[in-house]
């Protein structure tokens, strides 16, 4: 390895090991606004519900779910997460997903639906990625429980 | 011609792709492992998520000043955990005349971490069994063996919204190898037949979920006395058209090969996935 490449490699390895490149959580309501505030989140969750309804792989998980309640709680949660003026009043992610045996493929499908809906709503790509950054770590609380 | 055949095959088999997020199977590198162009990544190829299968066919072409490399093969993955690949490499000595060929069988196992979902980077271990098909020339220039195994450990992670709001993929790979010019010039030499540790890395920015641009670096050993071997690097753009097709174009710098210096040129890869 020549001297020229070493700093780049070291930076890469540091990034990988320390997660120095990951985003800090949102502290302002910037993301909430970029997602279209209350109306935008309602549209987002409604879009997501339609996608879930058409997805044979995951829809069965929701067969006994109170959908209006689920809709309200998901909007609340996304609002709070993105820095909006809401307080999430539902159960923890771990509690609400235990017993469903949600698989990695189920989780991937939901993420794909979310990406589809965000693109359809023409949400700014930075805001899309910031929302994904906030949701991705919930994976461990949702799958295989 | 090969591209046309691949396209036809893909159109004839419109099977549902797996659940993984678009682009997260990476592309297929010249040795058949999911990765960039010249570096294997920790990602598992194709779109098979938990309990799903995926198969793919690929064709990569590299054209530099005095040589060209054509690689093609098939690969499969299961459960976003196992990856198996069969690759044939044909290295044309455009200026010298003749060609060198080798086959690579690759196996990769996803050990821990999730590319998108965990703090820990995705970690995978892999082996590449390489068998030269016309060893006369490598033997004549001092290579010891006509077959060998490369071992590697790779770490890959996507950092969301890390660069101007775009997602960033970082990869670092550590390889143990005795291969001369990735095996195209055989393995080891009579003066030095020990494994060497080599560092490889890639960084890519996802401009959109389907379009990535990146750079790669691959450290190379230098065991043959007859000609210096230099590190490889490339820049690339990858377009994941949908979950069935991807196209990668790039510019590679392969340094010195068999006495010919400054070997630079294009990289082009097409992949079809089911
Ligand atoms: C990061 C991703 C996810 C988030 C943020 C999320 C959020 C939520 C919220 C807020 C609730 C309501 C909690 C409550 O009832 O108190 C809920 C319930 C539920 N979620 Fe998720 N979820 C995620 C992933 C998934 C996935 C991948 C699936 C399956 C495909 C899933 C299936 C369900 C089901 C079936 C319920 C209803 C439970 C019940 O009826 O009691 N969730 N989720």
Image (cartoon, rainbow, N blue to C red):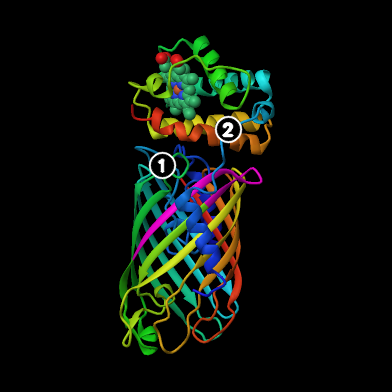
Percent coordinates x, y for residue A59 in the rendering: 44, 21
Q: Quadrant of ligand 1?
A: top left
Percent coordinates x, y for residue B64 in the rendering: 58, 75
- Extreme residue in the front direction: A27
**Are the residues at dot 1 and dot 2 in contact (C-beta closer than 8 Å)?**
no
Q: Nearer the viewer, residue A60 or A18?
A: A18
Give the numbered dot on residue A131: 2
Label 2 neighbourhood size at 10 Å, few (<14), some (14-19), many (20+)? many
A46 with respect to B80 (left or right): right
Label 1 neighbourhood size at 10 Å, few (<14), some (14-19), many (20+)? many
How far apart are labels 1 and 2 at the CA level? Answer: 24 Å
Q: Nearer the viewer, residue B263 or A5?
A: A5
Residue at the image position 47 percent from the left and 60 percent from the top: B29
In front of the other: label 1 or label 2?
Answer: 2
Q: Mark 2 falls on what kind of element? A: helix
A144 with respect to B23 (left or right): left
Residue at the image position 50 percent from the left and 78 percent from the top: B230
> Can residue B37 be seen from the camera position used here?
no
Q: What's the magenta bit mostly, secondary-structure-wise?
A: strand
Q: Which residues are magenta?
A: B151-169
Q: Which chain is mark 1 on?
A: B
Q: Quadrant of residue A63?
A: top left
Q: Is residue B177 magenta?
A: no
Residue at the image position 64 percent from the left and 33 percent from the top: A119
């Amino acid at each position: 390895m020549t001297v020229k490449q070493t700093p780049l490699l070291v930076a890469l390895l540091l990034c990988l090991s320390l997660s120095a490149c990951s985003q800090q959580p949102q502290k302002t309501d910037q993301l909430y606004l970029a997602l279209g505030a209350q109306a935008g989140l309602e549209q987002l969750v409604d879009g997501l519900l339609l996608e879930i309804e058409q997805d044979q792989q995951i829809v069965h998980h929701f067969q006994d779910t109170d959908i209006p309640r689920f809709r309200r709680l998901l909007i609340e949660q996304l609002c709070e997460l993105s820095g909006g003026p809401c307080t999430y009043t539902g159960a923890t992610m771990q509690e609400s997903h235990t017993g469903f045996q949600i698989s990695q493929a189920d989780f991937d499908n939901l993420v794909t639906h979310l990406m589809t809906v965000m693109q359809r709503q023409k949400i700014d790509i930075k805001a899309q990625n910031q929302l994904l950054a906030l949701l991705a770590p919930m994976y461990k609380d949702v799958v295989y429980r | 011609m090969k591209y046309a055949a691949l396209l036809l095959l893909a159109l004839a088999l419109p099977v549902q792709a797996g659940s993984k997020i678009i682009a997260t199977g990476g592309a297929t590198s010249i040795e058949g492992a999911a990765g960039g162009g010249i570096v294997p990544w920790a990602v598992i190829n194709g779109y098979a998520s938990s309990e799903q299968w995926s198969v793919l066919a690929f064709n990569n072409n590299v054209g530099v000043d005095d040589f060209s490399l054509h690689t093609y093969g098939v690969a499969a993955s299961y459960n976003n955990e196992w990856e198996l690949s069969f690759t044939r490499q044909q290295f044309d000595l455009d200026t010298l005349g003749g060609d060198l060929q080798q086959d690579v069988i690759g196996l990769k196992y996803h050990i821990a971490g999730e590319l998108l979902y965990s703090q820990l980077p995705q970690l995978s271990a892999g082996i590449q069994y390489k068998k030269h098909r016309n060893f006369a020339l490598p033997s004549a220039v001092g290579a010891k063996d006509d077959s060998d195994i490369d071992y590697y450990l790779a770490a890959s992670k996507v950092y969301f919204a890390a660069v101007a709001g775009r997602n960033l993929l970082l990869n670092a790979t550590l390889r143990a190898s005795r291969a001369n010019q990735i095996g195209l010039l055989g393995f080891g030499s009579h003066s030095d037949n020990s494994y060497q540790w080599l560092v490889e890395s890639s960084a890519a920015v996802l401009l959109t979920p389907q379009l990535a641009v990146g750079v790669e670096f691959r450290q190379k050993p230098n065991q043959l006395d007859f000609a210096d071997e230099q590190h490889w690097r490339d820049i690339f753009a990858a377009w994941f058209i949908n979950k069935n097709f991807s196209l990668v174009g790039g510019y590679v710098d392969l340094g010195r090969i068999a006495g010919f210096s400054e070997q630079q040129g294009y990289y082009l890869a097409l992949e079809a996935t089911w």
